[in-house]
Image (cartoon, rainbow, N blue to C red):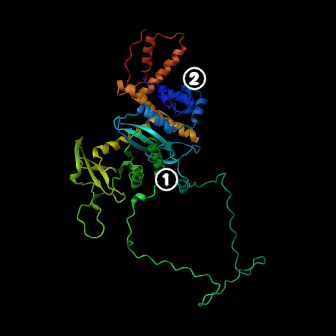
Amino acid sequence: MADPITLLACLAPVLTLTTIRQASRIVVALLAMTGRVTMQGMARWTGAGGSYRTIQRFFATVIPWERVFRVFFRTHLFDPDDVYLLGGDETVVTKAGKDTHGVDRFFSSLAGKPVPGLAFFTLSLISTKQRRSFPIQVEQVLRPVTESASEPPPKRKPGRPRKDAPPPSPEPAPKRKPGRPRKDAPPPSPEPAPKRKPGRPRKDAPPPSPEPAPKRKPGRPKGSKTGAHATAPLSSELQRIGTMLGGLLTRMSGQVPLTYLVLDGHFGNAPSLQMTRQHNLHLISKLRSDAALYLPYTGAYAGRGPRRKYGEKLNYAALPERFCGSTTVENKVETRIYQLEAWSKSFPQRLNVAIIVKTRLDTQKQAHVILFSSDLTLSAPRLIDYYALRFQLEFNFRDAKQFWGLEDFMNTHPTQVTNAANLALFMVNLSHGLLQPFRRRDPAFSLLDLKAHYRGLKYVEETIKMLPEIPEPSLLERLTARVIGLGRIHAAHAEPIPA
């Protein structure tokens, strides 16, 4: 069985011994504790050497989490025979109040609307062999000042003005009736100079302004070239992701070979493709269901003008049969997979498109999904499989929120918020390392079983401290096996304890 404290020993080149010792107390508490995962909750389960003040010091420490994730992955989770994908996704954590660093309104897919909270963007390495995702870099999403200023302030409901509201502006003075001017009125302004008659300009007159440039003739200027789509400016979101991506690829150069970046449908556009290709990766994402795609033109050249680029527009209700790669029927639902190369007028290059069309045989209702990649050599089954593996990131977020405190932390300082979010997602990787020996014996061993196991060990440890004598080793082993099985979903068989 892997010891969590032993797994942290690889971080000695990255963290100080004090920080590793504090982290070991917190990790053991996280594995055993129940209830909300806050600093006070951890202090109740850490025992000796893990007071509330110790946990406060840990969360106030600036930790190089990028190196922590990378060193731990290379030491305990990396498989040189595996093929890894690089995936990215954003998660939103709801927060109340206005004091937490980075709190703003972010769109939550679960709520279906913008909610007040924090957002974190995570880059993960996805194993195609183990079919699991390992977070490798986490960064908080901070709204630029320009974005926050562009949003109009919320309208206030009518009623009594607030106590801190500024005093109302004085009413303007009433207009004076026409008539004789007042005695204290200022003298009237001088009349404007009379207009000069046309003729020779004066000697002291300024030189005449140059005539405006003549209007350009309609049409394309002679000799102009088509502007490249790849030079379009990137949004602040894509610039932030591109910075994360470039730094990660630089640090992991030569360690983990990466070819594909998998992103969800929010990034199924030309700027995202441009950002991905700038880092020599291929993008795998999803297009809108009503995306306008065109087959490449295969007709003859007309003899004059530019060569035609776009051919027939795709009709998703009647796709050409020559592009159908496979057809399956299950539970009265027919699934067809089409693969083709197509143009989109918003993309600078041809796309490798895989279209999944599902048809109910009893009602003939259809639905389709359009996946694409910039790699024209990627097969449709592999393209679909790689995009499906992107959902492993959602499981990482679920585990981090449900078990490791991503949804529960109450820190407000920037350093504390960064440590809380990174610690929750680091525990996802650490739990994978702890689950490996258990799953060799029982492939169904789950994260709930792991927490029940360490909680049982905590109960046995505290109980033995209260006994006048330590039990015999055989009895202690059976007692431990019985207690750590409490609350487990897949409980191991334990020998009966003699009376």
Q: Which residue is mark 2?
A: 48
Residue that sits furthest to the front in the current view: 254
Q: Residue at x 64, y 52 (%)?
A: 162
Side (left or right) of 465 relative to 222: right
**Observer-nearest residue: 141 or 261?**
261
Instruction: Indicate the quadrant containing the N terminus: top left, top right, bottom left or bottom right.
Output: top left
- Residue 197: image location, x then y, percent: 61, 90
Which secondary structure lies at badge 1? Answer: helix
Inter-mark Cα distance, 1 to 2: 47 Å
Examine the rendered structure and indicate whether residue 44 appears above or below residue 426: above
Graded by Cα atoms within 10 Å as few (under 14), some (14 to 19) or many (20 or more), the crowding at tag 1 reads few
Residue that sits furthest to the left in the current view: 322
Q: Which residue is mark 1?
A: 236
Graded by Cα atoms within 10 Å as few (under 14), some (14 to 19) or many (20 or more), the crowding at tag 2 reads few
**Mark found first going from the N terminus, 1 or 2:** 2
Instruction: Indicate the quadrant containing the C terminus: top left, top right, bottom left or bottom right.
Output: top left
| Residue type highlighted by circle 1 | Ser
| Residue type highlighted by circle 2 | Ala
Q: Residue at x 59, y 29 (%)?
A: 54
Residue that sits furthest to the right in the current view: 183
> Mark on residue 437?
none
